[in-house]
Image (cartoon, rainbow, N blue to C red):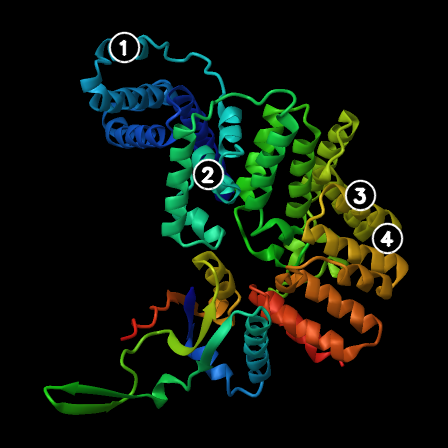
């Protein structure tokens, strides 16, 4: 229970942080300066509130204080440029701000700035996590296996870029919305687990920034209720989250999907996911996230009934590979096809994959599994060893070692 | 760019090397890891090291040799070996270091190698 209270306090803080930062940055477009001003305001609150009491509207107090800091900063920079009259005007506007005005929520614009095509795709997720949720560069760096100093520099450059390139805090036009939204959703997805492929792969135990990603996905559905793919992504993450407890046995050992205990699945999250997916499908914009969510739904249904509809799952994967031919989707398609048409058909698909598969651990796990089904013990062992060497998680390593010992 | 992955292991991990129950898993994991590095075409070199108690340290001070039993520094996690890899960026080196078995039990430290001294 205490954990719940802590979590809701954290959520409230996160919510306030993102709203305030979006408002501050949308006016000045200077994300870094807005962050500094907001940090100053939080610091001032820590000093003043215990002495003078918490103001009636803490957020309004923070916003006003941060705006003053922003103006002070601009004044220092622009004193010589004759901007004094404008600044005085601005300052008066701040003073007369009504305390509890219903502020516009500019977080959606902020999300689109973070995932703008002008921003390096590698840094979009990190930028979003920092700017919208206020996470530190160190936390983000650890989750993404990047050196903290490198992450700090990338974030700094990205914020500079938004300012220098003059990226507007505007919603994309109707025509460019689908493409721009994909970038936002991809960046949120990348925050879940450690990489794109891991959700279907074996390393899903690695705690990335799952909770943060879920929160951002939920926020996106609230801000864009008519976008089916936003709902698809949220449903997908909820399904994955619902299975978390079932992925490990009490000794911490890895449990593959086919042996997970459905009683350990979180029914509340599954119901929420089903509802999201049901709201998404009638919107008539089928996309990869809805398909992936539908696949998760079929898997869960199969675990619940004890028999899975392999043909339907293989067909969903076929659709997914057409819409989004990532390595993860193609390996998962091969696995699904092998269940319907046999190991040899699955292997054919695997062998036809493009390069870069050599470093992809789930590829080798599946390769080993299919070779073993065909009675090719030597090849199966070699593939298992390869998967073992590419694993990052100790529990997965143990699972593969046991499998290796029983393969001949 | 060449990087060295320093393999830091806990005393318990090092003990697994000779523990009849655990040694097979221990060696298989490292064998698979170095095989994966080699098949990715990035392995430059490396070696496993005997435990620190086998170390002998020598210092020369003012022309005098001082030889002592034991490692240069006593630490909780012990240097168990190293891999030298060649990859384009630190990001790649960190990706591979995370796969080193010691990363999930002890630690894997990544350091860029200095370039060889200029010739002539």
Q: Are marks 1 and 2 on the same chain?
A: yes
- Which comes before the other along the chain, label 4 or label 1? 1
Density class for disc 1 (Cα within 10 Å; few <14, some 14-19, many ≥20) is few
A79 to A406, vertically: above or below: above
Spatial CA distance of label 4 from label 1 is: 67 Å
Mark 1 — residue? Answer: A86
Q: Which chain is disc 1 placed on? A: A
Density class for disc 4 (Cα within 10 Å; few <14, some 14-19, many ≥20) is some
Mark 2 — residue? Answer: A127
Residue at 48% in and 63% down: B87
Q: Which chain is disc 4 placed on? A: A
Of residues B57 and A248, the one drawn nearer to the viewer in this rendering:
B57
Q: Which chain is disc 3 placed on? A: A
> Which percent across, then down, holds residue A341?
89, 59
Q: Quadrant of residue B63?
A: bottom left
> Which percent across, then down, holds residue A88?
24, 10
């Amino acid at each position: 229970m205490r954990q719940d209270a802590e979590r809701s306090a954290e959520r409230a803080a996160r919510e306030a942080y993102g709203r305030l930062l979006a408002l501050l940055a949308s006016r000045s477009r200077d994300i870094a300066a807005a962050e500094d001003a907001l940090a100053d305001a939080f610091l001032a609150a820590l000093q003043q509130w215990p002495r003078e009491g918490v103001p009636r509207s803490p957020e309004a107090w923070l916003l006003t204080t941060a705006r003053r800091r922003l103006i002070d900063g601009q004044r220092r920079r622009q004193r010589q440029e004759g901007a004094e009259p404008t600044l005085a005007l601005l300052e008066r506007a701040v003073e007369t701000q009504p305390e509890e005005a219903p502020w516009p929520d500019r977080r959606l614009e902020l999300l689109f700035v973070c995932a703008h095509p002008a921003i390096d795709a590698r840094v979009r997720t990190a930028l979003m996590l920092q700017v919208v949720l206020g996470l530190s560069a160190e936390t983000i760096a650890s989750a993404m296996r990047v050196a903290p100093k490198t992450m700090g520099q990338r974030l700094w450059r990205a914020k500079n870029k938004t300012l220098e390139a003059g990226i507007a805090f505007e919603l994309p036009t109707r025509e460019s919305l689908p493409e721009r939204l994909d970038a936002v959703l991809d960046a949120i997805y990348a925050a879940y687990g450690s990489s794109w492929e891991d959700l279907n792969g074996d390393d899903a135990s690695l705690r990335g920034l799952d909770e943060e990603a879920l929160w951002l996905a939920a926020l996106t559905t609230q801000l864009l209720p008519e976008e089916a793919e936003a709902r698809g992504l949220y449903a997908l993450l909820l399904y994955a989250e619902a299975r978390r407890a079932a992925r490990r046995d009490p000794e911490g050992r890895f449990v593959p999907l086919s042996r997970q205990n459905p009683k350990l699945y979180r029914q509340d999250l599954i119901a929420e996911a089903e509802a999201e997916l049901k709201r998404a499908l009638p919107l008539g914009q089928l996309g990869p996230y809805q398909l992936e969510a539908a696949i998760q739904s079929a898997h869960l249904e199969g675990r619940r009934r004890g028999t899975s509809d392999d043909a339907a799952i293989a067909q969903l994967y076929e659709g997914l590979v057409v819409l989004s031919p990532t390595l993860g989707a193609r390996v998962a398609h091969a696995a699904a096809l092998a269940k319907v048409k046999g190991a040899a058909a699955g292997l054919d698909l695997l062998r036809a994959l493009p390069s870069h598969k050599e470093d992809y651990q789930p590829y080798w796990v599946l390769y080993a599994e299919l070779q073993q089904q065909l009675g090719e013990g030597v090849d199966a062992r070699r593939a298992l060893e390869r998967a073992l060497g590419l694993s990052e998680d100790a529990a997965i390593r143990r699972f593969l070692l046991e499998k290796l010992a029983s393969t001949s | 760019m060449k990087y060295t992955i320093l393999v830091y292991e806990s005393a318990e991990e090092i003990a697994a090397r000779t523990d009849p129950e655990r040694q097979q898993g221990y060696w298989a994991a490292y064998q698979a890891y170095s095989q994966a590095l080699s098949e990715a075409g990035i392995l430059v070199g490396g070696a496993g090291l005997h435990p620190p108690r086998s170390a002998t340290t020598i210092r020369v001070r003012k022309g005098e040799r001082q030889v002592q039993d034991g490692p240069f520094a006593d630490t909780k996690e012990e240097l168990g070996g190293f891999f030298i890899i060649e990859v384009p960026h630190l990001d790649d080196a960190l990706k591979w270091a995370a796969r080193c078995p010691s990363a999930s039990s002890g630690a894997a430290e990544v350091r860029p190698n200095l370039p060889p001294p200029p010739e002539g």
